[in-house]
Amino acid sequence: MNDSTHHWIKRLAESRKPAYLVIPDLIEEDLASGRLRPRDRLPGLRDLASTLQLNYTTVARAYAEARKRGLLDARAGSGTFVRGRTQTLPLAGGSSVEMSMNMPPEPPELAARLRESSAQLFASADPYRLLRYQDFGGAPEDRAAGRNWLKERLPDCEEDTVLVCPGIHSVLVALVSQLARPGDTICLDTLAYPGIKAIASQLGVRLQALPRDDDGPLPHAFEALCKAEKPGAFYCNPTLQNPSTLTLSMQRRIALADVALRYSVPIIEDDAYALLPQQAPEALAAIAPELTYYVTGLSKTLGAGLRVAYLRAPGARQAQRVAGALRATTVMPSPFTVMLATQWVNDGTAHDMLDAIRAEANARQTIAAQELAGWSYDAHPDGFHLWLPIPAHCDWSASELALQLRNQGVGAVAGAAFSTDGNPPNAVRLCLGGPQLRDDCREALQRVADTLNDPHHLHMPMM
């Protein structure tokens, strides 16, 4: 550091910028020139303030700014160390931070086929049809395609119970608005898709978390709630749950459905990931068809931008009620994306894409197992996200880890985003589908492992 002292004093005197912004610039420049190297220890705040003839608060702000830029690590009692700026990874199209948005991987071998099929559709379709209002809930041919897709999980679903919708999230808005009034309760797992939290908050609906064990929400807790206060609905994401990757066992599904049937509580079955596993237990909609609103879609199995979902309602009357709610909130899905989805389901492209995405997910889960060897996490070989609890000995909080990874271009979502009981687990979710290439995925996971292993990570109190 002595070699840099005179250089720093001169630059500080010459610069018109505030000193607390100049010092991080100087650290970055010295890293680039080799005057500083990663793991070098910097002087303490009082020592550097004295050397540079600055006040303590200015130097404290400078170190804080350098930490925000990912240049420094510090731990109380150990000192402040140079980390160095980490080169960020290229971001996948449409996502703001790598590995934070839960999206399927994009197998490169499918690109030519997708271009060809979409071009053919555009060439053959009536262009004015793409600009007109569509039948609410989907035209007959689109509902038929949706029914064919749903038959993978619900072989007995009838066409007049199926709706074509603009994405699962839109369906959840319609269902919550139909099944619960402001002030009513919807019960769910202690971990859940953040979108359901946002929807409930917007509509003034209370969420009641059910205690869980390793197999999911506890049926006896569900029954106790039904006795005390009949909820408007039970929401669940039973297959490859976001974020925990848990798949409810058949025994647990039967037990939960039994409670719902005995107390006539509607079930919202958000089965966004159900077609990814080669095998999955029977859907709750098959166990309790008279109560269950089953929804799945194409954005989590084919591509995040394909905002097409299929809803199977308990009956034709309930389907029409939901269609009215969808009309009021979202009007209709995009005609072009629905026509594209229908063509892909009918000509087999959708299943080919699903197989390719599953194979790519398998490959990326293998990479994760290699790069995170020694760390315990939850995942499914056919899924494209993982749930990483942070061991106590790492001394990281999930929010700190997510912030540090974000500074390195690796996105992770902390457990608080998914918590419904106010007691978030110290864990992060990572999406393996975000990086466009397997090498990018490997590099991102290496950075996660390096950060977890880093003995000098930041725990410096705010000044």
Image: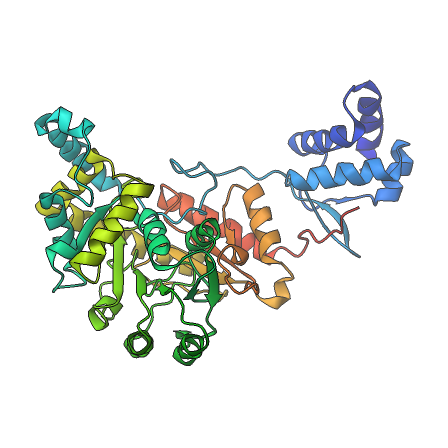
In the rendered view, would you say 438 is above or below 17?
below
Image quadrant where one finds the N terminus: top right
Residue 440 visible? The answer is yes
User: In the image, is residue 123 above or below residue 282?
Assistant: above
> Between residues 40 and 267, which one lies in front from this camera angle?
267
- The front one of 295 and 118 is 295
Q: In the displayed structure, does residue 339 sit left or right of residue 2?
A: left
- Residue 391 point in image, percent of width and height: 57, 66
Question: 259 and 149: which one is in front?
Answer: 259
Residue at x 24%, y 53% (from the top left corner): 321
Front position in the image: 436 or 192: 192
**In-image side of 269 versus 50 (left or right):** left
Residue 421: give x, y in percent of width and height.
53, 65
Q: Residue at x 27, y 39 (%)?
A: 331
- Please state if 288 lies on the left or on the right of 385 as rendered: left
- Where does the image place residue 113, in percent across and percent down from the top left? 16, 37
Identify the coloring.
rainbow
* Residue 299 seen in the current view: no
The residue under the point 68% across, 29% down is: 29
Which residue sits at x=44%, y=72%? 229
Q: Quadrant of residue 76?
A: bottom right
Image spot of residue 438 (x, y percent): 36, 46
